[in-house]
Image (cartoon, rainbow, N blue to C red):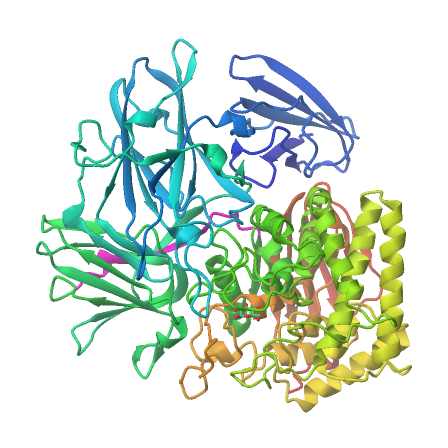
Amino acid sequence: MSALITRLRAEHRREAYGLGTSTPRLSWWVDSPSEGQLLWTEFEKTTLDGHTQTARVEGAEQVLVAWPFAPLASREMVEVRARAGLTDGTIGGWSEPLRLEVGLLQREDWTVPLVVPSASAPHTGPRPAWMLRAEFEVEVTPVRARLYMTAQGIYRSEINGLRVGDDELAPGWTSYDHRLRAQAYDVTPLLTTGANAIGIELADGWFRGNIGFDGGVWDLYGPHIGVAAQLELTGEDGVSRIVDLAESWRASRGPTTSAGLYEGEEFDARLHEPGWARAGCDDSRWVRPELRELASVSARIEHAVAEPVRQIETLSPVAVEYRPNGRIRLDFGQNISGRLSFRAAGDAGHVLRLHHAEVLENDELAVRTLRRATSIDSYTFRGEGDEEWQPRFTIHGFRYAELEGWPSATLAPESVKAVVLHTDMERTGWFTVDDPMLQKLHDNTVWSMRDNFVDLPTDCPQRDERMGWTGDIQVFAPAASYLYRSAAVLDSWLRDVAAEQHAGGAVPNFVPWVPCGFPEASSAVWGDASAIVPWVMWEQLGDVGILSQQFASMRGWVDHLAARADDDGVIRSGFALGDWLDPIAPPEDPGAARTDRYLVTTAYLVRSARIVADVAVLLGDSRATIAYTDLADRTLSAFRREWVLSSGRMKGESPTSLALALAFHLFENDAQRLEAGTRLAELVAEGGYRIQTGFVGTPIICGALAETGHVESAYALLQQTECPSWLYPITMGATTIWERWDSMLPDGRVNPGDMTSFNHYALGAVVDFMHRTVAGLAPLEPGYRRVRIAPKPGGTVRAAATRFDSPYGSIEVSWRLEKEWFHLTATIPFGVTAEVELPGEAERRQLGAGTYELSSRIRIAELRKIT
Ligand code: BGC
């Protein structure tokens, strides 16, 4: 009997390189047909010099298990492999080795200066990027060379003319006053003995570029930009040395004559010096940059916990149109976050402009909704044969592009590509369904997630916003942590949430915060991300570490919210966005919802206080357990007194208020729940099964209906195609999730509202219902250690399936209806158990690891489309 350990991972990452911790937690899958349990796991660590050490971890845990060896040191590289021992005596073979390499853990590990080419620069628009270069000698053949980098601004580097790494927009956007991320690169293959050179292009990025809406702000984190580059070589002699580049740095303006994340990038190839990053380049006219003590950077420098942003794929145009105005319009068939890359030959000085937009309006690129994010790149040809270019220091949200000044009469489709950029997360969740519209809804949600996970979770990728809005990820977190291994991205972002949280516990409505005029006061639902996102990571991934890391922040938020309550426990005042984008809200006032914003606020206090109480239990903090359990109970009673009638009906009744009270379990008993469910189904029917909810009600309404026995109402809502509905945008050609239900009006006009995006994942949070109820896979224990498989067919759906690569293994569920027979196939991995409930059957089956074919008979009458 075999029991092989596979997918041995450190933290949540596939690549354990440049780790920012000395004690990386380990996770693994066990691949075994055995009925036994995991009894122990043995690890073998091998150091660079071949020393091995073993350690054994007793028990069945296999997710984010504490590092079993002594803490690793900065720069330390080891290989770890593991093998399993099962309760039936099976001892598995050794796993594939996992190479772990730690980055620079201590501030004192950094000995290089911050190289500052520009201390401050007046601007009227986006500023040029700077070129930095330094030459250095390598005496001994390097057996190991590492380049550790961080920057204030965004950079791209080369050594001897060869690109370093493949990350984009490094070091990304964090709360720079608190945290600056460092990158580690293996540059051994790029070096030669003798003369070498390093070249870095540095642009404003988020550090001092224009960010934020309503005009945005410049120089948010400082008037300067700078980079720290620490090159460390280990020679054949085993001696490690840090290459002293201080006196060799030179700086110059270059071909990137302007670069803004929103505005786009201008590149004049005539100014490009091909050999600028090679030894021997004449830099006599370059200037010496300022060298600042790295100590001047007060923020903590820490290695990234998440994968970098990378070029994930390229798309070719699905349509090319030659426009009367001489432009060439390209439709890439998919709304993405990314850029164009092209290859063309043009005369020296010829300028090509690249325009971007998500949709067309009146047969023109709809650029009004981009607001100040003009998203225009321009390239001036060098005039030397075919030239290839792609911007480096900007990113756009687009499906359509127009080429203004393409240097030849026609365009060969392969000469222009759309490059998709986002954090290189591992896909973990899939969903298929036999209704092509629902399938498209799911696919569009996946794309909106990809397009808005560019280093941090943002609201949208195209306009002068693209910010870490808390409320959006709060409602989308269950979907985000199912579709992709997004834990590390969320972990990184939550660190900024905690860092920017105010003393009294208030959480900025978007993080990193940009003071661009939006109220500083926090809103419930948005601020609750600080409590709910870590909790969702625990539920979905079994990551208790994020709970202890964020506990103070979670408590702080709940304390802040509780402090806003009146003596009777109800919150009736303060900033509250409420059920944002309820369809009845007029375009210019998206917060004007039908549901009382303080009902929503008070309900969220119950939810978050309960979460904090549960976390306190997990962390063994009994005082906090008592305090927050009490707060949750008091607020719950207050909520019931204020809004719940004994029948289960509600004052301030609306689909959102009923769904919220059901989803948050605010009713006193099942009778009230059932009455509320019935009332909700009535309201939904009265609304013609068109959407009547905003940010708050939308993610939970289908679940609330299904859990109270109104599955068909949920499907009627889900499969509705009239506006407002989830499927209406698809009837209008959407390839991502829209911000507004009617971002595009049925007549093809773009919604007149100033705030209109075609790529917000928030309303796509409904895919969580599709995973849990349509396909039927939901966790019963954190990390899907124990799951519930209970598909609820309905509407016109006759087949659905889902797969989730959980922390314990890949779980698959698929079902189909054939006449009155319901057929289910389920695959449950080693270490996971399942409770299966088939439609038409009362009894639940308990299943262990294995693949199962199960069937049940259901009364057709139960299956009818009610619209
Ligand atoms: C953002 C949303 C956000 C909302 C709240 C919008 O501008 O795009 O994502 O949740 O404001 O006010």
Q: In which quarter of the image is residue 245?
A: top left
Q: In which quarter of the image is residue 718?
A: bottom right
188 sits left or right of 680 in the view: left
Residue 688 lies, with reference to residue 270, above or below; the image says below
Q: What stretch is highlighted in magenta?
A: 411-428
Query: Where does the image place residue 12, in percent across and percent down from the top left?
Result: 59, 41
Residue at horizontal 59 percent and vertical 25 percent from the top? 80
Residue at horizontal 39 percent and vertical 32 percent from the top? 229
Q: In which quarter of the image is the C terminus?
A: bottom right
490 sits left or right of 85 in the view: left
| Residue 803, visible in the rendered structure | no
803 magenta-colored = no
Residue at horizontal 38 percent and vertical 37 percent from the top? 165
**Which residue occupies the foreground of this view, 49 or 818?**
49
Query: Where does the image place residue 386, in percent across and percent down from the top left?
Result: 14, 50
Residue 192 lies, with reference to residue 451, above or below; the image says above
417 magenta-colored = yes
